[in-house]
Image (tube, helix red, strand yellow):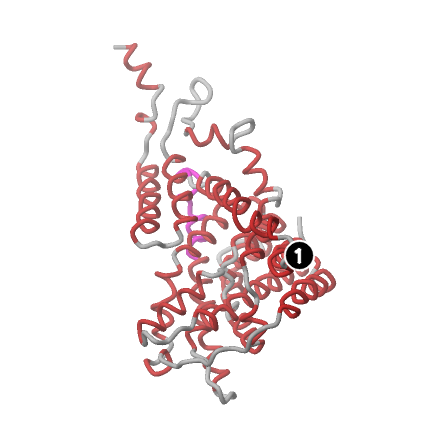
Amino acid sequence: MLFMQALLDQTGLVHFTWGNFVMCILGCVMIYLAITKHFEPLLLIGIGFSCIVANIPGPPDVPGGPAVSALLYVVKEGGLFHFAFEGVGKLIIPPLIFLGVGAMTDFGPMIANPRLVLLGAGAHLGIFVALILAKMLGFSINEAGAIGIIGGADGPMAIFVTMKLAPHLLGPVSVAAYSYMALMPMIQPPIMRLLTTKAERQIGMAESRKVSKVEKIAFPIVIAIIVNMFFPPVAPLITMLMLGNLFKECGVVDRLAKTAAGGLINVIIMILTVAIGSTMAADKFLTVQTIQIVLLGLVAFAFGTASGVITAKIMNLFIKDKINPLIGSAGIASVPIAARVSHIVAQQENPKNLLIYQAMGPNLAGVFGTAISGGILLALLGAN
């Protein structure tokens, strides 16, 4: 009998809690949404699976100590993903993600219709609403800044700003940022419909002008100069974004562009999702502070979506060629998720309404809007 008890003590069963059960269900829901609803499977499958494994207790690491999940063994010092997780914490992974995103991105829609940049600015109210609410809830001003940046819907930027302002919040902030990015097809449409009329949702938009190759090559160079000159706190990320885009547009380094947009970013995504999911153990995640951060992230996303739509409606009061307000919600920086949501909602009202290209304009502008917001926060609050 004592032998059986000793054997049982070496399993995870005796250490399994209701909190672990709740987090396992959450991980299963993420995987379900990724597979059946196609909600950003590249993110949710890895995060959901890692969340489940992180909540399956194993034997104690030391006799009499707490149970240790198998995932902790691969992320702790010396483990398989230890250095990968360090890459997130030491800000190596975020610039590499931006490099890959730049190599996949066509900035033509933003260059062709620069007025849509205003939507990228208008959709960032959520950052500052969440910051104010976080401060009212008792978070320090630096912690509030890190929580607020979730509203920019830019995972790498959220990691970057959080590591500068409040590195101890990296886990919940990154989980909230990437989870809500993946769940935007659920979060945004109700808000978009609430703030627009059927007639507004059916507004068609003319095709934008064709952008020349010279403009596309000059764009990343000019933006890199401007950002490094005026927004040095976030220059590392935007510089890599522009370098990746220059690889894509110059046409003479296809191997580099394909590597950055393909194999490199795919490996980075696998590492990043495991690193994020591994922070979702019940004892760390199911706390009042973490739940507050997750809820504040949702508020930030909701206000960002709403303020983008309202900005488009205000612009329509002063311009002749009306903007479909739905593309205002794409002004938050999740590329191309937010643009795709705008396009899908518009097509549900009018199957002939193709807004994906126009929505990419504010969506891309949102990347710079989040970078500017992050730069302002880092400049005003200081960095650790």
Q: Is residue 92 left or right of residue 62?
A: right
Where is residue 54? Give x, y as percent.
Answer: 41, 35
Residue 307 visible in rendering: no
Q: Which residues are magenta?
A: 281-295
Point 51% across, 87% down: residue: 319
Q: Is residue 287 magenta?
A: yes
Tag 1, which secondary structure? helix
Prevailing SS of the magenta stretch: helix
Q: Is residue 164 left or right of residue 184?
A: right
Q: Is residue 127 magenta?
A: no
Point 54% across, 65% down: residue: 364
Name the image quarter holding residue 246: bottom right
Residue 281 drawn above or below residue 135: above
Q: Is residue 250 left or right of residue 77?
A: right
Furthest toward the left, the residue is 1
Residue 199 drawn above or below residue 140: below
Point 41% across, 29% down: residue: 69
Residue 346 drawn above or below residue 15: below
Residue 359 visible in rendering: yes
Between 384 and 288, the one nearer to me in the picture: 384
Furthest toward the right, the residue is 229
Between 151 and 192, the one nearer to me in the picture: 192
Point 25% across, 10% down: residue: 1
Q: Is residue 248 left or right of residue 153?
A: right
Where is residue 172? Give x, y as percent.
Answer: 47, 47
Q: How many numbered markers are drawn? A: 1
Where is residue 27? Give x, y as percent.
Answer: 35, 43
Between 41 and 56, the one nearer to me in the picture: 41
Where is residue 159? Give x, y as percent.
Answer: 56, 50
Would you call the spot at circle 1 few (<14 residues within 10 Å), some (14-19), or many (20 or more)?
Answer: many
Q: To which residue does mark 1 refer? A: 239
Q: Amino acid at mark 1?
A: Thr
